[in-house]
Amino acid sequence: MTDTVETDVLVVGAGPTGLMLATCLAALGVRCVIVDGKSGPTRESRALVLQARTMEVYDQIGLVDRVLAEAEIASEIVPGFERRRFRAINLQRLATGTTPYPHLYVLEQSRNERLLVDHLQGLGTRVWWSHRLQSMAVTADGRLECVTDGDEVGVIRARFCAGADGASSAVREMMGIPFEGKTNVRTFYVADATHVAGLPADAINLRFGVDDFLLAFPMGGQADHRLLGVVRGPAEGVTEDSARSTLRRVFEVTYGSSRWFSTYRVHHRVAARFRDGPVFLAGDAAHVHSPVGAQGMNTGLQDAHNLACKIADVVAGRASDAYLDRYSAERRPVARRLVTTTDAMFAMITSDRRVARALRRFVVRFAAPIGASLVPRVVRSPRIFEYLSQTRIHYWMTEQQRIAARARRGRVVGRRLPWNGDNYESLRTMTWQVHGYGALDRRALRRVGVRLGLRVRFFPVVRNRRLRRGACYLVRPDGFVAAESRAEHAHADFAGHLRQIACA
């Protein structure tokens, strides 16, 4: 056993969130150690769908081509009521001009983990499997001393620790952080099924019933699908045979065999805080919710991306320790909105109340077909896709900005950089940078870049309506826009923002 390992960040948990965090830290030049009590990556499929914003993150870290090569692409959502199908909603049409990834990408959690493990090893960092965190304490010099039960690494001394160790997080328990929320009384079933009949292929299928619900994702293979549903009655009565019976009777959906079948209760919970001194929570350790909307794994991966960029700025001396408070300020509201939304949707789907059953019987049956038909025609704004794909997330860059704006959110500042068709390649450096759009004083903006020590990129053709011609933007390493200015004022505006994070 190695007596003590010194590092900047200890990442506890090697699921998708922990692996993404370690990968981003390694890419940003931050020393990290990642440990997990399991003997290796997850074998079950578990989480399944990657949203557009997550694909943009994969692009930044150089993995998007491998993801695209392995993922099943779903460009449509096909809603329905019991045996009846409604008109398909084309996601690509809704996403026009929003992102280079205008679909849903089906790639199971186990394959995401393997891709990240391989990429992490290529960056010179390995996962210490079979190393479970036993204790954690702050030493006299302010560092964390963490003890594991592994054979190779015993004591890890780190400046920071990130708990990405799932809903039963040992890190969260050791820090005494409450996990606030509730557990739904209903029981879900999940099956990875082969030879599925009765569902359109290559589409997300969303079927409602008066008392039942079905969500299905294509998984390639021999008409393989992930089937998710809820079965009425006591939890102990939910078996694969009962699930098959419900699928056949209510939805006219059948399948041959299953590679995986499981049941579980749905939890809606958010940690009371995402930061406690040098300790952070991310992914399921920080928030859990129902699978409605296919948001869970995506939210965790984006937690990791956000946190890694902030820690890298602090370790490099570009930002003060207080800047790390922005992680919780930015990501916890996202988690709370997501949990609230999915909780409400799940309640509508599973409630036994007369009003809810009446809505499912009449509104979904008769109004939904009209809505599904009108949405692509009436809704010209890509907002529906943006909400689903997590590309519409907004952060307040500083508390002062929020107060000055009187809670009115901007078109660009505080959001991920609008896609212009040619401006995302520069984000792969994961560095602070300045972008200029349209006709502007290039010489003046280059001087700004030199004085601030930042790379400057120019984009003369403005294709995205949110970007202002003649404007320049300060872009964070995670791709979010920190500030907007004109070239003649950019140095003062951008230097002021950078001073704020350095002296926060």
Image (cartoon, rainbow, N blue to C red):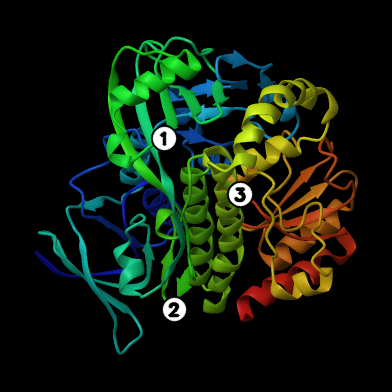
Closer to the camera: disc 2 or disc 3? Answer: 3
Q: Position of residue 278 (x, y in %)?
A: 41, 75
- Location of the N terminus by quadrant is bottom left
Amino acid type, label 3: Thr
Residues 421 and 286: in front is 286
| Residue type highlighted by circle 2 | Gly
Q: Residue 91, image x and y in percent?
A: 67, 26
170 is higher (above) or lower (below) than 420? below
> Taking 224 as reference, is 283 above or below it?
below
Marks 3 and 1, Cα distance to the nearest angstrom? 22 Å
Q: Secondary structure at mark 1?
A: loop
* Residue 491 visible, this angle: yes
Tell me how far mark 2 sits from mark 3, CA to CA: 30 Å
Task: Tell me the quarter of the image containing the C terminus.
Answer: bottom right
Left or right, residue 442 beside residue 235: right
Q: Which residue is mark 3?
A: 341
Q: Secondary structure at mark 2?
A: loop
Residue 8 visible? The answer is no
Distance from disc 1 to disc 2, alpha carbons, whole Å, reads 44 Å
Q: Report the residue marked by disc 2.
A: 277
